[in-house]
Image: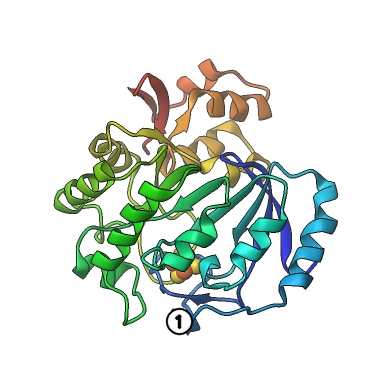
Amino acid sequence: MKYVYVVPSRRLGKSLGVNLTPFKTCTYSCVYCQLGRTTCKTVERKEFFKKEEILREIESALKTNPDYVTFAGEGEPTLYSKLKWLLDRIEEKTAVITNSSLLWRKDVREDLMNADVCLPSLDCATEKTFRRLNRPHRSLTLSKVVEGLLEFSDEYGGKIMLEIMLVKGYNDSREELEKMAEIVKEMKVDVVHVLTPIRPPASDVEKVDAEKLLEAMRFFKGCAIDFPEGRDFDFSTFSSLNEAVRIMSRHPMREDQVKEMAKHFNASVKDVEEIEGVFCKEFGGIKYYFYKK
Ligand code: SF4
């Protein structure tokens, strides 16, 4: 398979990922990008690969019974000019993960109307941080991106899951978070996912700690908040529960996720709670577990 791949996703269940661009063809070159630096920074929409070929692969991979067909991949999927053509032909539930950079374009917003779920991102609220963190194509400005995001959230009838990636020393200041919260308040979003990089990023950047994530969540009250890190958990890579709880220093876990982790090691949630460094806090009626060395 050239364009599709199956990934487990806590947010979207079993997801059939579809890549629509050549490797690192993107409108941004984010410092936290796990794929490395962008090699083709562009805002020009194109049919990078033949739409019929992509559709054929999707159709043949549908036998894996995915919960969602998710357009994401190795670059910005809205750069693919035949996105609507594909979305119109897929009867299964669809999702698009986008960096929001082209939502100011009417054709891009129209293309997305047929997707069941959209996961746009917004990482900052000031032009300076935008240039430093997302390193956008020179033709893009943050005000243009925000304008598009607001228009899209107004027009779109599906579910919007907004992603905010926090990077230490870039967009985690009180001022930036407050301004971001103002923008998010204007949007119609179903859920906000506050994340921090957990895989080796393109540049030498640091993740924020669990307490900063919790602090950030407070700024987005009024929106449902969730940590979508489940898909990144692979407990089989840890030899013990004591080792696995370290995940929670980067990503707080909900109680159900802690239960799952404990089960993997034939232990209980109580065993997790007794590990030195583990503590929990409640937010929005949900219990979150943290770990601090
Ligand atoms: S928008 Fe996504 S693919 Fe593009 S550089 Fe940023 S993280 Fe990487």
Relative height, residue 22 to residue 169 (above, below): below
Residue type for callout 1:
Thr
Ligand 1 neighbours mark 1 (CB distance < 8 Å): no
Res 9 seen here:
yes
**SS label for mark 1:** loop
Task: Kindly indicate the quadrant of the structure image that contains residue 225.
Answer: top left
Q: Residue 211's x, y, as percent? A: 29, 38
83 sits left or right of 50 in the view = left
Q: Residue at x 55, y 39 (%)?
A: 243
17 sits left or right of 188 in the view = right
In the picture as drawn, the residue positioned furthest to the top comes out as 270
Identify which residue, 18 or 85, lies in the foreground: 85
Q: Residue at x 39, y 67 (%)?
A: 101
Instruction: Give the position of the N terminus as an image quadrant.
Output: bottom right
Instruction: Give the position of the C terminus as an image quadrant.
Output: top left
Relative height, residue 278 to residue 12 (above, below): above
225 sits left or right of 38 in the view = left
The residue carrying pointer 1 sits among few (fewer than 14), some (14 to 19) or many (20 or more) residues within 10 Å by Cα, namely some
Identify which residue, 258 or 184, lies in the foreground: 184
Res 33 seen here:
no
Q: Residue at x 47, y 28 (%)?
A: 254
Relative height, residue 79 to residue 125 (above, below): below
Reading the image, the residue beneath label 1 is 42
Q: Residue 150's x, y, as percent? A: 31, 53
Q: Residue at x 29, y 59 (%)?
A: 146
Q: How many marks?
A: 1
